[in-house]
Image (spheres, rainbow, N blue to C red):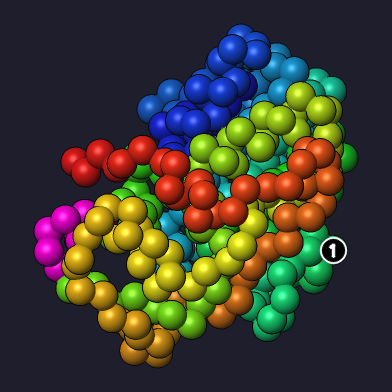
Amino acid sequence: MLTGRRGQLGVELERRLAPLASVIATDRSSLDLASEEALRRAVREARPDVIVNAAAYTAVARAETERAAALRINAAAPGILAEEARALGALLVHYSTDYVFDGAKRSPYGEDDAPGPLNAYGASKLEGELRVRASGCRALIVRSSWLYAPHGGNFYRTIAARAAAGERLRVVDDQHGVPSSAAFVAAGSVELLRKNVEGLFHLVPSGEATWFEFARAILDKMGSHAPIERVRTGEYPDPVRRPAYSVLDNAKAARALGHPLEHWHELLAAMEEPVLL
C-alpha cells in the first residue's frame, strides 16, 4: 500500500514497486490522511504486507502558521499507519527529512546524532518518526534532503522555469545540504526493501552543496546563461528558520546497500529535463 502516489517521491516509488508486487496506490483524492477513521479503514481493507508512506505536508513556510495541519499529516497519520502495521505484522516504510536537525554541526549528520528542529515542518516530521518508533511496528525510516524531480513542485523546477523565463536569480549560498533526486531515493528505498532492511537510514547521494551551488549546476545542465547572484540567508526574505548545515551522512545506507552511493552531480546530469507546465 502506497500513500502519496502523485507526489514527486510517490510517482517514482509506484513506478519501481509495481513490478515487484500488487500495489494499492492512494493519493489525496482517494485517502484523507487527516482522517483517522479513513486511514484505519483503508489499511484494514487492503491488509498489505508493506505500507510505504510517501505522503507528507511539505509546505515548509506555511507550516509555521498551519502547525496543526502539518502535525496531522506528518505525525498523527504516520503514527496511525504504524499502529495498523503492527497489528498486521506489516512493514512500514516512512520518510523523514534533514530538517529534523538544527544545523549547528559542520560535519555530516549521522543517524545517531541528536535532532533539534528549528521550524514547524521539521518538528512535525520528527514527531512522525517518534510515533512510528513508539508503535513497536517493523519500520524502515528513511531521511532524505532537498528532494527534486522533473515533476511536481521543487527547487529544481523553480530554478529551471525562472531561468527559462530569463529572470535574474538570487540564491542563498550559506545553507549546506545534499540535493537528492526522487528517483535516487525511490530506487534506494526499493533496494533496501528487497534486502529486508529495517531501522533508520540517511538515504542521500554523496557530496554536498549550497542552494547557490545546486542552482548553478541546474543552469549548467540547461546550458543557461541566466544571471545568478549569491546572497546570504539574512538578505533573502524567508519567514522560516532553516538549518545552515543539514548534510546527512549516507555511510550506513551505503553499507546496507553494498555499494557507494552516487554523487549528486552525476544524478542531476543524468536526469531528464523538467516538464515546465
Q: Is residue 76 visible?
A: no
Give percent across and percent down for residue 124.
60, 59
Q: Which residue is mark 1?
A: 112
Whether residue 191 sits left or right of residue 157 in the image: it is right
Give percent across and percent down for residue 220.
32, 60
Crowding at mark 1 (Cα within 10 Å: few <14, some 14-19, many 20+): few
Specify the quadrant of the image occupied by residue 95. Answer: top right
Q: Say which residue appears at 56% left-offset and 23% top-offset.
A: 16
Give percent across and percent down for residue 170.
28, 77
Whether residue 20 sits left or right of residue 201 in the image: it is left
On whether residue 106 falls in the magenta region, the answer is no
**Which residue type does callout 1 highlight?**
Asp
Looking at the rendering, the stretch of residues picked out in magenta corresponds to: 160-167
Question: Which residue, as the protein is rendered here, is positioned at the far top?
Answer: 22
Task: Indicate whether 57 appears above or below 273.
Answer: below
Task: Indicate whether 31 appears above or below 102.
Answer: above
Point out the image quarter for the C terminus: top left
Q: Is residue 210 visible?
A: yes
Q: Say which residue appears at 39% left-offset and 78% top-offset.
A: 172
Q: Say which residue appears at 56% left-offset and 15% top-offset.
A: 18
Whether residue 99 sits left or right of residue 235 in the image: it is right
Q: Return the residue nearer the eye: 44 or 97.
A: 97
Give percent across and percent down for residue 195.
81, 28
